Image (spheres, rainbow, N blue to C red):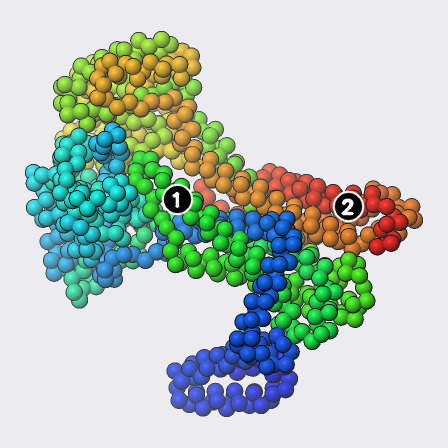
Amino acid sequence: MNWLIWRLYPKRIQAEYGVEIEDFLLERAATARSAGWTRLAGWYIEALVDVMRTHWDEWRSSWGGNGKTTRGGTMNVILQDLKYASRRLMKTPGFTLGAIAIMAIAIGVNASVFTLVNGLLLKPSPFGDSDRLVNIYQHSDGGDPNSTSYPAFRDMTAFTDVFESVAATSPSNATLETEAGLAPIATEYVTSGMMQALGLDMSRGRWFDPDMDFPGAGNFAVASHHAWVNRFSADPGFVGQTIRVNRQPVTVIGIGPESYNGMGGFIVTDFFLSISSTEIEGPFRVANLDRRSDHWYDVRARLAPGVTADQAQQAMTTLAADLATNFPEFNEGRGITVLPSDDIRLHPRVDGAILGVSSALMAIVLLVLLLASSNLGSLLLVRGLARHSEVAVRRAMGAGAGRVRSLFLSEALLLTAVGGAVGLLLTGWSLTLLGAISLPDPLAGEIDIGIDWRVLSFSLGLILVTGLAFGWAPASNSMRTDVGKALREDSRSASGGRRAAVLRNALVALQVAVSLILVVGAGVAVSALVSVSRVDAGFDVDRLAWVRTDFSDTGLTSEERGPIGDELMIRLSALPGVSSAAVASRLPVEVGGSTTTVIEGYEPASGTDAVELDWAQISPGYFRTMGVDLVEGRTFDESDQSGDGMIVVVNQTAARLFWGDRPAVGRRMRSQGSTESWRQVIGVVEDVPVGSLSEVTPPLLYFVMGETIMAQPTILLRTENDPISSLAGIRGIFQEVDRSLPVEMNTMTAHFGEALSVPRAAAGAMGLFSLMALALASIGIYSMVSFTVAGQLPEIGIRVALGAAKGSVVRMIVGKIFLTVGTGLALGALAVVIAGRLIGPFAVGVDLLDPVTLIAALGLLSLAVGVASTVPALRAANANPIDALRR
């Protein structure tokens, strides 16, 4: 350690006082060691501080060459250099604007992505005494931490010696009546203990009372602070007003904390609703409060004073055992996990994916920054080589090393600082656009992400690091200029020597390697998009249209909406070109309901007696309208609608999973909460995508719709021609049947296109990054070749004068650059292979090492490099040999 500290001192100090410093360090270290390890650590810290102070003094003395520059004088010199750099940059507006644009885009992209990552992973929780806050999860059927049933939450509140407060919340969506019409809002049903559990105070008004944790106490809401400010213009009289949610009156009793958006973090909840308000969502939401089979609530608790998270876990393990004994049908094999809230960002099931996506995004945009910075470094190096005569004059007049380096570093830092400022403006603009986007179900709500001190610090760090790192190369190279030779030569004749050439080639190779990584990433994203878009839907998508409405806001009973539903079906089926129609509770490639189901004769590996399965409720004729083929047994007919409904059709995945090669027809299953209500399988149909196009098709159950249309039906129409033409008259039909019914409609092709929005966005982003990479690499290579050729014009003139063919001259120039490019391609390919092997096991369904993609990327980059290097080579080969020799 002593030797390392000695080596950290400036070389001049080592040469003049090496032995004395070494002896001093050994003596002081021995004295400190005898006083204990704490004192020794303190001594080493003191020694490192002295090293830094010595370097500072050496650097200051190098500015004027005499060591007498004062602190104020140093600052004046820095300001002079910045003024000089700005004047030089203003004389070359093309170069300056181009460099600023490059850095603005690179730093802006990095700041934007980091802002998202900051909001997701880094921003500290706003909760008071957050070390006492824990999240409690009942396990899913697969044994993972999941949401909790409301009865289990009530059981947890009984542990008053463990928890000071326990609260539950369940996200939902609703419609808010406004003067402009119905508006979708994001809601949460929350219990009375939430503010105490979180350790937060209300902005205005009050939170829910304990008697509001049960149906019958009335409808009450607390507006989130974000919604109050953005939806209601921070109206001070909003508290106490009555709003209409789902067409029912709800009293606003308060405004939530400014720092809390809800359980979704940066996804804003518009209104928190009391548990007593569940009646506005219908009887199913109310009945859910008493069902142990429905796990809809997330639970947070504040530990009692002196209680640790481990002690809370022991208490919840005891509770899980009691629930398994008292309610084995719902809780046998189902544990309860307690986790510190500081360790959870959104939910244990999604935190890992968020971390992975965030890391991938940051890696990609940092590669873009590295590419942009290396490009800027190449341009600055070339620009600096043209100033070797100026540098030589300054050094001949006594300018120190620090003084000369400052000329180049000032220019680089000025470019990156202005580019970074513009990049931050771009970041703010992009976040404003992002905040104005309302997310689709099931993530309804606005995004609330802003620039804070962490984002500003990150951006400032990028500016300093990139400016210093890529301004240092031309600065250091300038110090190796032969003063006498430079003063004798014309400034245009120098190319910087071997060291400058090595630096230029290294920067170009770096640009090519990074470009290859980004181009391969774009190719993989496009390949994944093509693969997903080619997924066999299992039915004819092109001739299908869908129409969706919602009876739940009309106040009609199930008996009253029956005739309206029948009239709609009759009139929609009679539209020109419509061959058949059916009703379903969900579309393919859409999030829908699930049910905890016991399969007779099947034992889940999780240890519980049930599995969570997706389901859809459909009318007879659904499979015919959709074009889904029957594999075994039969499908529903009209007589089944008036029956007891204790029949079910399953998809092929369910049949294979639960019964293997045995016939599925005649097998039985039941809801976990209905011990005697067995459903019999009457048929098996082909698989269709369930939740997304990219997933492995899960088991799916089909239940028959009764004689009354469901509250939120989706009507499917099979057409003989283009389904778009059938959509034209639909809105008029709804106006005639019932003007109060909302209408949403589109084609199935468009619906599948929306399902590809995420992979399409990923492919688009990677494509943009790859184009940026190609452009930056091409600019860098073009600049380097142009500068190199300019320095070799006399040599080229001699070759041409001696009879060398122009083609051979071009091949010579391009061949040299391709040696550098080949090194970059090899490094980039190696990085791609390593990344593919590391990430490959986690990228399900995506081949990160696809040789076709890699070869295509290599070819594309080679083509771009060939064009960028051939243009200046041709210009040099076509130059007049006499003019070249004169230079």
Q: Is residue 428 left or right of residue 879?
A: left
Between disc 2 and disc 1, whose residue precedes?
1
Q: Amino acid at mark 1?
A: Thr
Q: Is residue 457 left or right of residue 351?
A: right
Instruction: Please tell me which residue lies in front, 754 or 113.
Output: 113
Instruction: Please tell me which residue lies in front, 425 or 843.
Output: 425
Nearer to us: label 2 or label 1: 1
Task: Tell me which residue sits at (73%, 50%) in the image.
Answer: 785
Q: Which mark is residue 432?
A: 1
Give coordinates of residue 816: x percent, y percent. 76, 51
Q: Quickly name the residue at label 2.
A: 873
The residue tagged with tag 2: helix, strand or loop? helix
Task: Tell me which residue sits at (54%, 39%) in the image.
Answer: 767
Do residues under tags 2 and 1 come within 8 Å of each other at their CB atoms?
A: no
Q: Toward which corner of the image does residue 169 lie, by quadrant?
A: top left
Q: Is residue 832 left or right of residue 762?
A: right
Task: Tell me which residue sits at (40%, 58%) in the image.
Answer: 454
The residue tagged with tag 1: helix, strand or loop? helix
Residue 449 in sight in this render:
yes
Q: Toward which corner of the image does residue 866 lie, by quadrant?
A: top right
Give coordinates of residue 748: x percent, y percent. 39, 23
Q: Is residue 336 left or right of residue 107?
A: left
Please determine whether, in this image, residue 268 is positioned above or below residue 756: below
Please determine whether, in this image, residue 325 is positioned above or below residue 132: above
